[in-house]
Every structure is written in C-alpha cells, then in structure tokens.
C-alpha cells in the first residue's frame, strides 16, 4: 500500500479489538509493543485494565483482601470497558455514550486517550520517522468514529484523516484513509492473526530438531 520495501518502512500498528495493542515497527521489525510479559499491559481493553500504577494493585489487594488469583481475575477479566461501563463490547459503549450515559462516555474517552498516548509515544520511539499508522481488528477495521477520535487534532504529528475515506473503511476493507497531504499515511488493514500464528509456528517447528523415532 505504501509502495516501499518492508525493510525500509516504519509503521505504528494499532490492533484494536477485544484485546488491543499498539506496536512500533522500524524497518519492518517490531521494536516495541504495548503488551508486556502478558497482554495485560498497555491499552484499555474489553475486560483488561491495561497500564496501571503497580501501587494501585497492592492497595486493592490490601483494601479488598484479594488473593493473587482474584487480583488476576479482576485485572484481566473484570476491568477495562467492562469494569467502567458494564459492557466489554465497544458498540454498546458507543451507544450508551450517545444516550448520555456518563460511564460509557468515560470508557470511550479512556479507550481513545490511551491509544493516542501510545501513538505519540511510538512516534518518539521511531524518531518521528513514521510512514504509516495502521488500524486493524474489530474496532480498528469497523469503527470510523473511533479512528476519527484517535487521529483528530494530531495534524501537528502529521496525521490527517479524510472523513469520507474513513467512513468508507468498514467491514474488513483494506483502505488508505489519509487526507491528501497527510505526512503520515493512515491505513486500515484487516488482521489475520490465525495466518500469522500458523506461519510463525511453522517457522519454529521447522527449526526444531527432529524427534527420534
Ligand atoms: P475483535 O476482538 O477483533 O473481534 O474485536 C471485537 C471488538 O470490536 C468488540 O469490542 C466490538 O464491539 C468491536 N467492534 C466491532 N464492530 C464495531 C463497530 N462497527 N464499531 C465499534 N466497535 C466495533
């Protein structure tokens, strides 16, 4: 889509689904990702809190008397959009916010704000040399509203979306949604996690020593 060799291309990918993460890719290789040792770190997700002050976790354990397992369940399965709004489905959160529900509006604002912070941070990681920001997965591929909110007022960082192209990028279409003249291109690219997992698994097992009969 950019007409450049992958090994000369820098991108920031925003995989926004029920699980979400942002990655900084320099010359075709991932050099940073919002996920940590587990997928809990980083963005606010459907049921995961994402980035949190570790002291807040210790405070919660003490104040509520939670075990390690209960804390894990709280942070991974009962937090994020679900904890804030009662639903882990962003469509329901958007609908609620439209009806004036303050918790849904908060969930929506927090979701968008966290993605914007990571894009800004990864711009710095990539020394400001970014060819494209890519949106992918259920939210990234389908929600013109969320993409629009993420990139609005980021013209100073070189990001500018074309409203009509953004609105047209729904239902798994691969599209360039940049406004003419946007220094950083904005791309919507459907994810294919299963293919990627299969390819990487094949790479690992084909390197492994054959098992003796
Ligand atoms: P995934 O995990 O990639 O299947 O993505 C699931 C998430 O995508 C859920 O939070 C859905 O609410 C969200 N999603 C799917 N379609 C839309 C849409 N049109 N607008 C907003 N969110 C959507």
Image (cartoon, grey):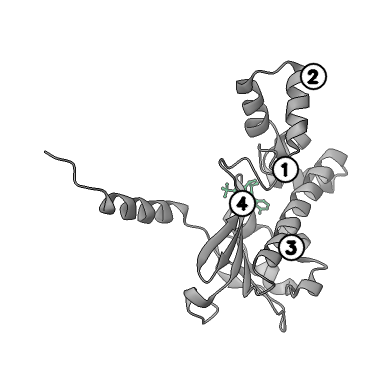
Q: What residue is at 52 percent from the left and 72 percent from the top?
A: 27
- Closer to viewer: mark 4 or mark 2: 2
> Could you classify mark 3 by the number of other residues whose Cα lies within 10 Å: few (under 14), some (14-19), or many (20 or more)?
some
Residue 54: horizontal and vertical position, in percent?
Answer: 73, 35
**Real-space Cα separation, disc 1 to disc 4, in angstroms:** 21 Å
- Residue pushed farthest top? 65
**Real-space Cα separation, disc 3 to disc 4, in angstroms:** 14 Å
* Residue 16 shows up from this direction: no
| First in residue order: circle 1 vs circle 3 | 1
Decide if residue 212 is on the left or right side of residue 167. left
- Closer to viewer: mark 1 or mark 4: 4
* Residue 22 shows up from this direction: yes
> Could you classify mark 2 by the number of other residues whose Cα lies within 10 Å: few (under 14), some (14-19), or many (20 or more)?
few
Asked if the residues shown at circle 4 and circle 2 are in contact, with their CB atoms under 8 angstroms apart, the answer is no
| First in residue order: circle 3 vs circle 4 | 4
Asked if the residues shown at circle 3 and circle 4 are in contact, with their CB atoms under 8 angstroms apart, the answer is no
Q: Which residue is mark 4?
A: 21
**Real-space Cα separation, disc 4 to disc 2, in angstroms:** 30 Å
- In what element is the residue under mark 2? helix
Q: Which residue is mark 3?
A: 120
Asked if the residues shown at circle 1 and circle 3 are in contact, with their CB atoms under 8 angstroms apart, the answer is no
Residue 187: horizontal and vertical position, in percent?
Answer: 61, 70
Q: Which residue is mark 2?
A: 63
Tell me: residue 80, above or below residue 169.
above
Q: What residue is at 74 percent from the left and 39 percent from the top?
A: 52
| First in residue order: circle 3 vs circle 2 | 2
Q: Which residue is mark 1?
A: 92
Q: Is mark 1 within 8 Å of ligand 1?
A: yes
């Amino acid at each position: 889509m950019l007409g450049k060799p992958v090994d000369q291309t820098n991108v920031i990918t925003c995989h926004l689904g029920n699980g979400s993460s942002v990655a900084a890719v320099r010359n075709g290789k991932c050099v940073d990702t919002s996920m940590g040792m587990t997928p809990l770190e980083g963005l606010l997700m459907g049921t995961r809190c994402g980035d949190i002050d570790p002291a807040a976790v210790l405070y919660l354990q003490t104040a509520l008397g939670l075990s390690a397992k209960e804390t894990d369940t709280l942070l991974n399965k009962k937090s994020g959009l679900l904890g804030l709004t009662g639903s882990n489905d962003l469509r329901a959160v958007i609908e609620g916010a439209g009806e004036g529900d303050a918790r849904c509006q908060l969930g929506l604002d927090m979701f968008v704000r966290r993605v914007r912070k990571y894009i800004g941070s990864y711009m710095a990681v990539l020394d400001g040399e970014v060819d494209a920001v890519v949106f992918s997965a259920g939210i990234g591929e389908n929600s013109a509203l969320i993409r629009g909110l993420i990139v609005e007022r980021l013209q100073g960082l070189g990001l500018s979306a074309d409203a009509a192209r953004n609105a047209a990028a729904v239902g798994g279409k691969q599209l360039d949604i940049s406004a003419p003249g946007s220094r950083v291109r904005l791309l919507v690219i459907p994810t294919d996690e299963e293919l990627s997992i299969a390819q990487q698994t094949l790479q690992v097992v084909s390197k492994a020593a054959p098992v003796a009969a």
